[in-house]
Image (cartoon, rainbow, N blue to C red):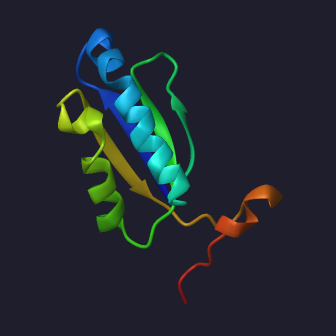
């Protein structure tokens, strides 16, 4: 699993101008089964996305396609982790430690 931490590098008016495109991008990756949860950080200086994927490289490719990144108004920090313990509702995403 991956935690994608988004940090805005521009004013909120520039972010808001691209928000509809960003939301469409999010919806596409939810539909593809890559994104599990997302939302704004508090205070509103970015956001967080929980994602699943086969490789860090693929997740980084997806992040590079975010309209916020393409417009140069945000940056991502990608953190990979093994979700070895989950709530029952997230059991599908539970992972095993490597042997």
Q: How many marks?
A: 0
Residue farthest to the bottom, as pictured:
99
- Residue at screen point 71% across, 63% down: 85
Q: Residue 54 location in percent, x, y?
A: 43, 73
Q: Where 83 falls versus 18 (above or below)?
A: below
89 left or right of 41? Answer: right
Q: Where 18 falls versus 12 (above or below)?
A: below
Q: Residue 60 location in percent, x, y?
A: 29, 57
Along the viewing direction, whichever of 77 and 62 lies nearer the viewer: 62
Along the viewing direction, whichever of 21 and 41 lies nearer the viewer: 21
Q: Does the image show residue 24? A: yes
14 left or right of 93? Answer: left
- Residue at screen point 36% across, 59% down: 59
- Residue at screen point 28% across, 32% down: 68
Q: Residue 23 location in percent, x, y?
A: 44, 34
Q: Does the image show residue 87? A: no
Along the viewing direction, whichever of 20 and 82 lies nearer the viewer: 20
**On the image, which quarter does residue 9 sit in?**
top left
Q: Where 70 falls versus 31 (above or below)?
A: above
88 left or right of 29? Answer: right
């Amino acid at each position: 699993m991956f935690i994608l931490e988004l940090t805005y590098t521009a004013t909120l008016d520039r972010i808001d101008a691209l928000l509809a495109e960003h939301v469409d991008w999010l919806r596409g990756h939810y539909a593809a089964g890559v994104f599990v949860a997302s939302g704004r950080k508090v205070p509103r200086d970015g956001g967080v996305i929980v994602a699943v994927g086969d490789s860090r490289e693929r997740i980084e490719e997806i992040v590079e396609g975010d309209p916020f990144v393409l417009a140069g108004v945000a940056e991502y920090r990608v953190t990979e982790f093994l979700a070895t313990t989950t709530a029952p509702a997230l059991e599908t995403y539970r992972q095993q430690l490597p042997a």
